[in-house]
Image (cartoon, coloured by chain):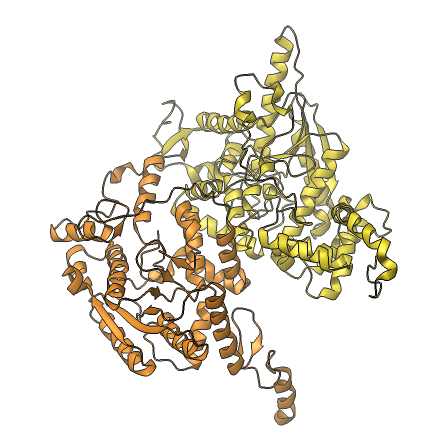
Amino acid sequence: MQSAAAPTRAGSRLCKRCGERKAALKRPKTLEQICRECFYIVFEDEIHQTIVDNNLFKAGERVAIGASGGKDSTVLAYVLSELNKRHKYGLDLFLLSIDEGITGYRDDSLETVKRNELQYGLPLKIVSYKDLYDWTMDDIVKAIGLKNNCTFCGVFRRQALDRGAALLKVDKIVTGHNADDIAETVLLNILRGDIARLSRCTFITTGEDGPIPRCKPFKYTYEKEIVMYAYFKKLDYFSTECIYSPNAYRGFAREFIKDLERMRPRAILDIITSGENFRISTTTRMPEQGTCERCGYISSQKLCKACVLLDGLNRGLPKLGIGRTAKVGARADGSGEQQGKRAERNRLSLQGKHGNLDF
Amino acid sequence: MAAASSSSCGGAGCGAHCSSSTSSAAEDAPEVGLGRLSISGASASCGKCGGGAVVVVAGGVGLCGECLRAQLFGKFKLAVTSNAMVRPTDSVLVAFSGGPASRVALQFIHEMRSKAIGSWDASNSQALPVFNVGVAFVDESVLLSMPECEVELATEDIKSIVSSLLPGDKAMHIASLDDVFSSESNSKDGEDRLRELVGMITDDTGREDLLQCLRMLSLQKIALENGYTKIMLGSCASTIACHVLSATVKGQGYSLPADIQYVDARWEVPVVLPLRDCLAQELSLLCEFDSLKTQQLLDRPCGGINGLIASFVARLREENPSREHTIVRTAQKLKPFPFNKFSANGYHDFLPSRLRPKFQHVDSDEPAFSEVLCLICRSPFSESELQNLESTRHNSQKKIDLYTACCCQSCHVQILPGGRNLYDHFFSLLPKFWTERVDTASASHSSLRDQIEDYLLEDDDDGN
């Protein structure tokens, strides 16, 4: 009986795309039932299309891939090196990792990146907090505890990436931010009233006025598909959460987006579309970009955020620059809200997985 | 879209014709309701007047019932006057759903009118007339499986609420949702047609949103037939916060600012939202405090994405009570559309001359508005939707293609039925009021086509 039923079952589940092979998965983005091979093709083609449509790269450019060893950056490194060969982008690709100095987490994930270096044949550069700031995250947590530690990590990482990129003399940095991350950022910026960030958080390339632009080739790629790709391709990645912020993933907004995706998969893309189409008047004031007086890094203030935080650490005043310190009692409506907003603004907007976004 | 009466409300008090599932009528247990919001130290006195026991903490200050009332009325009045929402010659139709928010809107506009009548009586010249107020209730019981007697009771309740407002000179209009189909020659019964139309939509959220649009159409119809010049909705900050998120999630980021302004004049009869700055919780508290009777028996629970967003916003509110305000404030920073203010010539003439310049300032560098609105939800078209419409206009001869291109991306996804073969039937079910607009717009194009018809080689596909 079973053998009689089998062909009909298999027949009804042929790949929607090629119509030849057996469907092996339901594509998270569209819920189409397709085979594994077709999944690889559509997944890679979409990324290629994003790269071409947005003119992300020019031939001959040196590009650093921000590699943490996690699934997003591992898949990015793999896919980008494949596409570079297949479509002859003519890029010089590098892996760029930041060693925050978190024992039991980063040291292990860096091992993964080192294996990736060999697997994909991409040169790797590791920049460490210890070298740049003379502090590891372990030291910082020892000094300030588990509150606000993500602020330090986020601010330092952003700068470290730029410094590492400068050392590699690359023209661009690519990061593994995916569609879910961007949708989440759009929502968070609405929830916190940050119209300036709202206007640029859906840009595929940012920092074009700065020394090294960053881009996000996974802007339209669903997290679930990235996981699926890594799983089927058996890519070597590291999937432990940061020990200092095990719940960073579980902000309200993240959970909401997951629920939403279950209800209507295209909602993630719709949020990004909304973010791109918001009618934000061009006069919305953006912080003016200057340079830090101390380290020369881009900054809207006299000193860049990293220098302020570092100063606080070195002077034993770790709350310096955190922003929530003054007038804690006055968390009444107006001023409290203002203060909260300022504090939130101090955090990095796109550090969904690392930042403390439980607002 | 009719943000106005957005169906996802996230709270007990919400917009006119909101479909909140929390149908705790005010008279149920006022003490419980008050207790919910009062601060623990019951001895605290009002932070504003120093007297009275605190019933609500608004903006960090505990307020007594009287002060809460004054604050809400102040917000309402400021919204009405500073946006020139109601002119002395106006006839205002209040959309009353039975919920707390529209109940408060009804109460406040009633009070403003009573006061205006008082000053009219007292004035020597009696030069300016006093605006007129009417009330509309859209009955959706057709789509609810509810015993008829209950529906009747609820409707009677609504009527009694309105007639209890003295002087009781307010016209009450009760329209069934299927009335929007009734004026048409089409032989099919309105009720069946409504059911069939709703049944064709596979997406829960889409179904809810279509009903929302029909509700607005129904209000427009009542207003037009009875000579009203404004429609007033009870959409409050909480409703609007939900709408901001749901529009974002549905990909309507471009058209969002159109829905959340005090004034929305894209409709035949302009719509105003004077409670935009009040929270649902405050409004239902006021209803409890002032024993304003509400009737929410006929509300439909909201599901789908709207329901998900309502519960998300409720969670955010728990974590930070002013989050809804923040969300509305973010959306307020988006650029509104030209129809979000009254701009007709002479509209502001009744205002005192010192106030007039504020309204008559014309933004000269604002590009002319394209006036292309979605066939179903009336949201303005974004650049890509416009391009799509243009190319359809040029390339396609089928009317169905034109209708389809006249729907915004979001309606396309969640309201239009699954297969293209169903489109014909779907559009034939829609109220003619909507499709006619497209017909008129395309008439000029098709008349050109008629002239060259004989020379075209395609099959006749301009069907209906």
The tint chain B carries is yellow
Q: Position of residue A61 (x, y in %)?
A: 35, 69
Q: Is residue A301 above or below residue B145?
A: above
Determine which quarter of the picture holds residue B400: bottom right
Q: Position of residue B118 (x, y in %)?
A: 61, 14
**Horizontal placement of B39 versus A327: left or right?**
right
The tint chain A carries is orange
Residue extending furthest front? A60
Q: How many marks?
A: 0
Res. A56 in view: yes
Q: Position of residue A272 (x, y in %)?
A: 49, 57
**Horizontal placement of A192 versus B12: left or right?**
left
Front residue (pair A50, B128): A50
Q: Is residue A63 above or below residue B139?
A: below
- Which quadrant is home to the N terminus of chain A? bottom right
**Horizontal placement of A306 versus B379: left or right?**
left
Front residue (pair B14, B27): B14
Q: Position of residue A40 (x, y in %)?
A: 49, 79
**Residue at (56%, 51%) from the top-left corner?**
B252
Q: Is residue A137 above or below residue A38?
A: above
Res. B10 in view: no
